[in-house]
Amino acid sequence: MLVVVALGGNAIQPKESKGYPEEQWAAVRRVARALAEIVSEGFEIVVTHGNGPQVGYLLEAMENLPLKTPRQTLDLAVAMTQGWLGFLIAHSLEEELARLGVARRVAVIPTRVLVSLDDPEFSNPSKPVGGYYGREDAEVLHKTLGWVFREDPRGGYRRVVPSPKPLKILETPILKSLLEEKIIPIAAGGGGIPVASVDGTLKPVEAVIDKDLASSLLAVELEADMLTILTDVPGVAINYNTPKRLWLRRVKTWELKKYYERGEFPPGSMGPKVLASIEFVEKTGRKASIGLLEEAFKVIRGESGTLIEA
Ligand code: ADP
Ligand code: MG
């Protein structure tokens, strides 16, 4: 049984942590324990992960470099986070597997994802990245670097970048070979590095792909038996921010769509997880689950979290 396991950004940098290396290792250790348990029970896994806090950190670091130092592009920043987080997860996972007496290796694969420049996001970018700016600084950055800014509801201005729909994972054949060799791949980190066809050649683009949607596409391409999205809440709820909150245990895609259309799941958080799950289930007829990272194994078995079925 092959499961694509998507880890939320909080798996590596919990909301309460500042982002020191020791904190990252401690958080990833918990993740690795959960993943090692799944593998030791006989499941094959492919691990994907978010990168919000880390890509934000890199962008902020670049903003604070001396002016003569070149700035790197967003596609390179995503690639950096794939190596960074991939290393943390792979190293910890191999250690935890060894502790359980499971001799398996883990490979980190920098992953490119095809997007289309015709995607409406390129003319109307929606995804905020990096820090908050005052109006004047935002204007300067817009003039000098061409960055697009949006006023943020929390005050100030933030850079927004396109978040196009993922169309194809370029490294899928490599991931299949690794799985045949019993190597555990870590792939599509941060939703993958976006590339688009320009005059017949593939070029990197400055955009950010949602990691839940990329994970869903990867699960379809790998013909996985399940998509499991691990995060910091015990599943999908309706009436989430009200006293009438109800956690969904098992839900059919048609029901979930109805809740989605009612606006139960915000675009920046639970929305993409729900969409990603619906897409996987509808395309494959298989199941998806969403739940707490700490209960990963139970979530995969449908004993905890929300199970989404056709
Ligand atoms: P991740 O880093 O794992 O992708 P996100 O912050 O993007 O995590 O999404 C998880 C968050 O979604 C939860 O912390 C929760 O506060 C929020 N959320 C919003 N609406 C809902 C809902 N209807 N049910 C469950 N969680 C929700
Ligand atoms: Mg998220």
Image (cartoon, grey):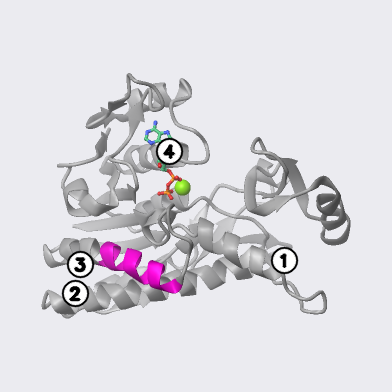
The answer to whether residue 106 is left or right of residue 82 is left
The one nearer the camera, 194 or 265, is 265
Query: How far apart are the two marked residues, 3 and 4, measured between alpha carbons?
Result: 26 Å
Q: Amino acid at mark 2?
A: Leu
Q: Is residue 73 above or below residue 234?
A: below
Q: Which residue is mark 4?
A: 270
First in sequence, mark 2 or 4: give its number. Answer: 2
Q: Which residue is mark 1?
A: 63
Q: Which residue is mark 3?
A: 36
The majority secondary structure of the magenta stretch comes to helix
Q: Which residues are magenta?
A: 21-32
Find residue 201 and report its horizontal and vertical position in percent.
Answer: 68, 67
The one nearer the camera, 42 or 129, is 129
Query: Are the residues tagged 2 and 3 within 8 Å (C-beta)?
Result: yes
Q: Nearer the viewer, mark 1 or mark 3?
A: 1
State the mark number for residue 97: 2
Find residue 36 and report its horizontal and vertical position in percent.
Answer: 20, 67
Question: Which quarter of the picture shows residue 26?
Answer: bottom left
Q: Nearer the viewer, mark 1 or mark 4?
A: 1
Find residue 279 and report its horizontal and vertical position in percent.
Answer: 40, 40
Query: How far apart are the two marked residues, 1 and 4, measured between alpha carbons?
Result: 30 Å
